[in-house]
Image (cartoon, grey):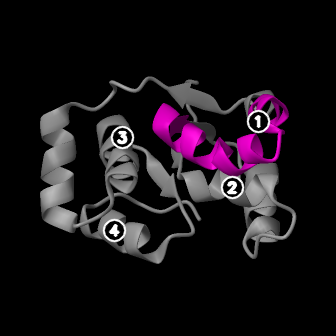
Amino acid sequence: MAGLMTTLLDANIIIALLNSGDVHRDRVADFLRTTADDLCLPMLSLAEALVLQVRVGRGEQAEAKVLALGIRVLPGDLVGALSLAQVRAGTGLRMPDCVVLASAQQLGARLATTDAKLAAAALAAGVPLAL
């Protein structure tokens, strides 16, 4: 989307959105409601966010809710193996978080996360935070 800032969402943003009892839900819902950014997330992050919903039989509905918000799902091969390995070696983050950080770097995007360790690694890597 031309002219818009791209914001890459971490799985915890979607998890908070889909779970009414999540401590971050209100802040995430406010952000999603008020942002004009082009929102996207890696396929792996969407899968991670849907695990609980699948376990309780609401996987398809939850995925449809996310997609109805206009959030783009990025292909799984957006970031190469070497880039992921470099992020993992340099940060010590879990691989799903490495996918998020490397994808944000690849896209030149801001990052929306409620994970303090991922946020700190993103800032250290020069990736601005959106939330």
Secondary element type, mark 1:
helix
In front: label 4 or label 2 = 2
* 24, above or below 15, in the image: below
In front: label 1 or label 4 = 1
Residue at coordinates 54% horizontally, 62% vertically from top-left? 113
Reading the image, the residue beneath label 2 is 15
Q: Residues within 10 Å of mark 4 (few under 14, many from 20)?
A: few
Whether the residues at callouts 3 and 4 have beta carbons within 8 Å, the answer is no
- Amino acid type at circle 2 is Ile
The residue stretch that appears in magenta: 41-65
In the rendered image, which quarter is residue 89 located in? bottom left
Q: Which mark is residue 88?
A: none
Tell me the CA gap for discs 2 and 3.
19 Å
Secondary element type, mark 3:
helix
Tell me where residue 128 appears, x and y as whole percent. 41, 60
Q: Which mark is residue 103?
A: 3
Q: Which mark is residue 123?
A: 4
Tell me where residue 112 appears, x and y as whole percent. 55, 57
Whether the residues at callouts 2 and 1 have beta carbons within 8 Å, the answer is no
Q: Is residue 64 magenta?
A: yes
Tell me the CA gap for discs 2 and 1.
12 Å
Tell me the CA gap for discs 4 and 2.
22 Å
Labels 1 and 3: the sequence-earlier one? 1
Whether the residues at callouts 1 and 3 have beta carbons within 8 Å, the answer is no
* 99, above or below 30, in the image: above
